[in-house]
Structures are given as structure tokens and as C-alpha cells.
Amino acid sequence: MAAAQQRCALFSQVEWRALKSQQQLRSRLLGIYARAFANMSASDIRQRYTDYFVKNGHTLLPSADIVPRNDATLLFSSAGMVPFKQFFLNPATAPHKMVTTVQKCVRAGGKHNDLDQVGFTPRHHTFFEMLGNFSFGAYSKREIIHMAWKFVRQELNMPEDRLRVTVLETDNEAYDIWKNEVGVDPRRIVRCGAEDNFWSMGLEGPCGPSSEIFWDTRDPRYSESDDERWLEFWNLVFMQFHRGADGELRPLALPCVDTGMGLERVASILQGKMNNFDTDEFQVIIRDIDARCPPGQNSGNVDLAKALACKRIIADHLRASAFLISEGVFPSNIGRGYVLRRIIRRAVRAGRLLGINDSVLSALYPSLELAMGAAYPELLERRQLIVSVLESEEKMFLRTLDKGLVLLEGIFASGNSKRLVSGADAFSLYDTHGFPLDLTEIIARDNGWTVDVEAFEQIQRQSRERNKASWKGKLTKQDSVAREIEATCLEWEEAGISSQFSGHDVDPEAKPTAATCRVVTFKSLSNGDGLLVIDPCPFYAVGGGQESDAGIITIGDSEGSHEFAVSDAVAMPSGQATVLRLTATSDQEHLFRGGQAVYATVDEVRRLGSAVHHTATHLLNAALRKTVGASVVQAGSLVQAGGLRFDFTSSALSNEQLREIEGLVNKAALDNIEVATACMPLDQAKAQGAIALFSEKYDAASVRVVQMAGVSMELCGGTHLRSTRAVFPFHITAEGSIGAGTRRIEAKAGVAASVWLQQQLEYGRATAQTLGAAQLSVMDKKAQQLVDRNRALREEADRWLRAAAVNAEAVATHSTALGERGVPAVFHILAPLPFNPRLVAERACHLRDTEPSLVHVVIQGRAIALGVSAEQLPAEHAAALLRCVLEKLPGKGGGQASLAQGQLETAVAELAQLAHL
């Protein structure tokens, strides 16, 4: 080994210049790599890293989920330290003071997005693995620098002359440790500015100076002084501060350490590769891609460089999509699901360029299992789910891709001298045909065109404005005065009108009392209704998925008291006031003088029903996460007095899972858990484990946390019960898909559930009576008897049909030739009665099987069927031949290779109608 290291060092500049080509140099470099290192596989590197730090007192923990738990600031875990942010904030709470992990990471979407670079650079990935070790107050700079250098030099056998380190220019302590204690040549220690050696997780969070270790690639294109020649592969971060939302750095209670070593980068070094995609685990997948490219078309319709990029895109995106699906992320049009959809579609497009016209990711999945299944058993355990989701999404997009390509080809052929896809065309592709803008840009760029993105975005904004179903300044009941209401809300907001919401102080189960309030402002609407702001305001405004309160406003004057119904309530865009809509206030404006005392009474039935179902929604979310997994993400909700609706990302739930979810919610209800609320800073709420919606924006200074101890903790501004008791009984009334990877549960709780269950009982009794069942318990037996009887009758009918098909003689026949190859065909016209389209198909199948050398076309009235023997006529396809027939006999139809069916526009009853065939 020492001799090999000496040979590395003995490469003189003269020798470099003497080599005649980059290929010669690269070959020699790879030879030196092979002699200098053991060729460690990615699996070997994972094991050696974790074993080393376990030996040095660290606890090995499994990778956390890619979908961060309780962190609304991130789409995905994009670094090894993400799961430990709360411990960097408060190291004393860390259950383990020294930890090592191999963390699954994704950088695609949000502020950490490498998607567009993948495939075209040696190092960018959407999915990657980060080897990390962490200290929560147990050790700091000195210890980790020594441990890191020992690992690199002794465990990985990297020669010192191929390494250099960087430190923050002001971090003299780290510089001294590297120079005086570790013994690194000071010429190999580089001081850098904060832009390079001060690490932070986004705009806020734990941060501190760092020290990075680099590898000299000796890339012949660069000199030793060029940054591009050096590959950073290990970052040692000395966590000393927390950056707040205001940008200020505050010292952490205890100094901590966070290190991250990219597995793919280290593998490229130790395997002697210049590109991460040439390492062992990637190559397992890429070799499978090579095998699936059409014979003689290994590069499809692109040059070799682009073909290589396409293969790398597919290999990378297979990893990312499979791991995301394994954690419950499914393709959709929002949040993480949309990122996954983009990843899958980008891979499908790459496959198409390689000449692979079918599903590519689902077909390649076994190679991913082979490459990474041993390290990540979930890939094996969840194979069926992952492959099913991939295949479904790929097939759906292949149809979209074909449509989009046809439309784009028409645009490219239009002779546009500017070679510019207009914003209107790009939006039509996106809005009507589901063709993503970034894909339109890629295809346009491949054809030497550009896309008017600015015009696209303008049209998209205009479309969103037109199509908005609701906004915070629009009332839930739309009518002819909606614009008048909207304008008034905006006017009052600009005028500084405000009010305080007092509804959280009201126990929804207590006897309602009228709250004394003051009129802030009032305006009559043209339809006779009125808008009113009162302070304080006990009415909840529609928001957070919950419907608004309703109730009564009472005003007294010299003539007595006057009552006005509150039909709706909405928050101003800024949330600074609640605007009430009152019905039938014509000629009553004088009653609503500023400062006038009024009495506000909230509809107790509606408020209680909403509170029951909002609390039930939180319990349902917790039960889903416990039953299905923490990767379940809320995608929308509706809370009403009569029930709830909850949308979430997941595959279909089994009946057993639904029953388990119901049981968990009902148990929590019967446990009568206190529903506690508290306001606190956002960082504190997240540190305590509160769940936040990624799509929501929160005030960092103060959020409201709703907690049911041991069961649920969420950020929420809605109205809730004081305890969970009134949620019982809870029953799921429906569950189904509302889009790819997104499910919807509808449920009822409390009194609404009791009423619903009573209705179901009445329906059951009525059905039992119809079936002749004396008791509900035997109703299923009676129903099964009917099903069995119906099945027997259908089987008997099928037997008759098959017999009839054998004996159904044609009243006329006509022989001809069909298709480009002129295959012999016989047309059979059946008698018009008894008419049965199934008889036509059965007759075509019978003739196909008994006379397989001919194509048989059977017609009865307007019904037509065509049969082709796949064994005797393998070059023919029934659906294609039927299309040929329908060109002469107008109609529509389709089918498979051996049988196609359709319907003619005009019935055929005699041979004369077939004379032109």
C-alpha cells in the first residue's frame, strides 16, 4: 500500500504533460486508484462507517423517514441532521448523546432542489445517502477532527497527498487542531469565507462554522489550484448557534457536532470512478436499462451523450420515486406528491428518448431491489405497493406524453420564425392535457425552440384568479353581490378595521349565552343583506377547513329589540377582523351605529357539531398516522356540523385498516382526554412535536397548538371540544380515491353519527324485510342465496349463448381481403332476430377457433365483431382490421389482438351493402 501511495505522489508535471490524451491519463489514473485502495462497494462503505463510529461510542440509529416528522419548513429530509434539529436546539433532551446514521435524503422541490441538474453532472442526485455522526454536547471540534482524519486515513486508506481541508477564515481553533494536533501540512489547510464554511439549514435553524475534507481528483482538465479539481466529500459542522427568524445568531446551550459524508461521492473515490453514476449500485440499474433498450437502438433517438444522461436520469429517479412511495408519498398535484409526479414523468420522458415506449421504472424495480434491497428491506417488503403506484402513474403519463408530443410537433411544424412556444400554447398543454411546463421546456430545447415562460405564468395567474373557489375575503355562499362583499372587506381592511375573536373562550357543550359586543362598522348590501363587524366577535369565520358559525345578533332600542340572523362569517384577507353577513337588514341601518351595544348568540347546534367534527378530525389524523404510517400527509379537510371530510396521501385502505382507525378514534373518545390549547412560538411548537400542514403559512411568533395528550398535537385555529367524550360514536361512512395517490375519508361523530347509524339500521331492517329475512343477522345469507341464484342463471344463459353461437347460421356471406397484406376474410350476416351483441362476439370467436386460417367478421344489425387467430395469423391484429372495415362501413369500435367489437352507424341486412368491400 505504501508503494502505491508513493507512486501517486511521484506523478510529476512533466509526466502529466507527456501523456498524449485525456483518455490515456484517465486510464492511468484509474490504474492508480485500483492499486491504492481496496475497491469498496457502497455496502462495504456503509458498514465500515457505522462500525467505526459505533466502536467510538456512538449509537447506531436507523435512517429517519425522508418525509420529515413535524417540520413544516421542509418537503423532504435533505441532510443527515434534519431528524435531529430539535436536539441541536436543546441537546439535554437528546436520548443518545453520540449518534451515527445512514440517512436517506431527497433534494427535489422546495428550497433544496437538484432535479434539473440530475443526469447532466457527475454528482447531482434527487435521492442520495448521507453518512453522518452527531454529538449533542458530548464532544466538539477537537474530537471529531481527530476521528474524521483517522477514519479517512486508516479505515479508507486515502493517501494524505490527495487530501486537503478547509476551515472558516476566523476559526483559528479548528486551524490549530488540523495543523498542530493532526499534523496536516499547512499548505493543505485552506481558510475560506462564510459563504463556503459556515453551514446552516435554511434561513433559520441550527448553524455554525464547518471544516470540509476534499479529495484531489487530478482531473487533467484542471491545475492543482483550480477548485473544480477538488471533490468535497465530508463536511464537519461545529454547531454553535441557532439562527432565528430575525436572522440573529444565538449560541446553543451546548456545542454540538453534525457531520455529513455523501456515500455516492465516497464510493466514486474508492471505486476509482470520475462519476457517481459509474459506481456499483447505480451500474446494476444502468445495465438493466441497457438491456431494455430496443435492439440496435441503445441510444434511441438521441446522441450518445444524451443517451447516457437519460440512463442516469432513470437510474436516479427510480431510487427517489421508490423510496418516496415506500414512505407513503404518492403522485398528486400538491406538495410532495407533485414533486414525485415530476420525478416519475421526467424518467418516463428519458425512457421514451431511449426508445423504451412502455413503463420503465416499474420494469426496472427488480434491479433496484438487487442493488439496495439488502440495505433497505422496505424495498422488498413494500414491493407490490411501489410497483403498482409506479406502473399506474407511468401508464397515465404515457398517454399524456403521446398527446403532448403530437401537439408540440404541430407547433414545431408551424413555421414560427421565432421558434418560440407561446405562453398560450404552453398553458393549453398544461391545463388541458396535463403536460408540465418543465417538460414542455425540455422538449422545446431539444428541438431548438424556447418557451415564453413569462407569458405562461401570467396566463396561469389569470386562470387561478378566475377559478378560485374561495379566498379568505370571500364568503362561503356565493351570490350576485359577491363582488360587493369582496370590495367592502378590502376597503375595511385598508381603513384599519379590526376585531378580536372571542369564540375560543366558549365551551361548545355549555348552555349558550349572549355575548355583549360593540358595533365597529356596518354596511348595507344591494340585495337587502348587511355586513357587520363587532368587537369582540364570538363567531368563527370560515377557515382551516371548518365552516363558519351562524347565529343571531340582537339590538335593542326605544321600540324594543330587533333580531338579525347571521348567515355567514369570513375573515378579512389579513385576518385582522371577522365580517358577519346579516340577512334582511333593509331600512335598519340606523340601528348599527358605531359603538352601539349588541348581543351576539352563536348557534349552539352548529358550533357544537363543528367542534365535535374538528376534534374528531385531529383524532382521525393521528389514527391514520398510527395505522398507515407517519408518511401520511393531510391534503385537505372539511369540517361541518353534520360530518367531516379528510383528504390524505396514501394507497387504498383495507377494511381491516378502516376498522382499526375507527377503533382508535372511538377509544380516544371514550378515554375522555382533555383537549388542551396553548399559544407559543412556531419553533417551540415544532420542537414539542406539533404537526403542521406544509401548505400552510404560520406566524413564527405565535401559533395555536391543540393537544390531546398522548394521541394528537397539531397547529390549529379552529374550535374544539374541551374533552374528547362527545366524539363518540365515530364512524367512517366512505373511503375512496380522489386522484392518484390521494384518498378521502368521510365520517360522522357524536350525535350526527348516532343519527346516521340509526338510519343505517332502518335501511337494514327494510332490506331484510325485502329479502324475507326474519332477523338482520341472517340477511347476508339471504342475499348470498340471491347472488348464487343469479350466478347460476347467468351461467345457464352463457351456455345457451355459446350453443346458439355454434348453430347461428349466416343468412349471407361475403368473401374478400382485408388490410395491407390482403388477408382472406369472410363476412357473415346473421338474421336480425333474436338480436344479441354478445351472440355476435361469441359467433366470431367460434368461427375464429374452427376456421383459424381466415379472418371472420360477424354482423347482426348494427353490431359487428371480428375474430383473428393469433396462432395462424400472428401478423394480424383484430382491432386494426376492424378499423379497416369501419372505413368502409362507418361506425366505431376497438378491441384486442384476437377479438374486436363495435357498432355500425347503419344496420347491415343484405349482401348488397357489402359489395364495395
Image (spheres, rainbow, N blue to C red):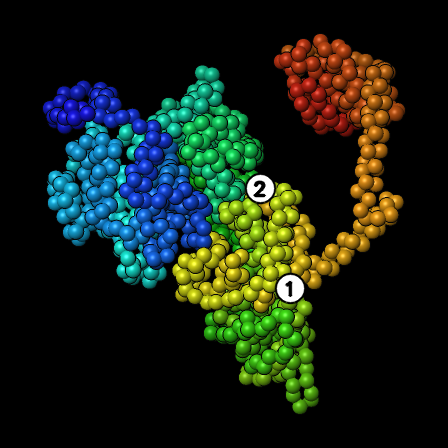
Where is residue 693? Give x, y as percent.
Answer: 49, 55
Which residue is drawn at the image coordinates 32% and 48% (left, top)?
98
Mark 1, residues whose alpha carbon is within 10 Å: few (<14), some, or many (≥20)? many
Quadrant assignment, res 320: top left
Instruction: Look at the picture and state if 534 lies above or below 635.
Output: below
Where is residue 607? Give x, y as percent.
Answer: 63, 68
Where is residue 372? Give x, y as percent.
Answer: 42, 31
Residue 565 relative to residue 33: left or right:
right
Label 2 amino acid?
Ser
Q: Nearer the viewer, mark 1 or mark 2?
A: 1
Q: Are marks 1 and 2 in contact (CB under 8 Å)?
A: no
Instruction: Look at the picture and state if 512 lies above or below 643.
Output: below
Viewer-nearest residue: 492 or 281: 281
**In the structure shown, which secondary structural element does the residue marked by tag 2 occupy?**
loop
Outermost residue, bottom side: 558
**Tag of residue 651:** 2
State how far apart marks 1 and 2 are (Cα): 30 Å
Residue 902 relative to residue 695: left or right:
right
Which residue is drawn at the image coordinates 60% and 63% (left, top)?
672
Mark 1 sits on what residue? Answer: 726
Quadrant assignment, res 665: bottom right
Quadrant assignment, res 614: bottom right
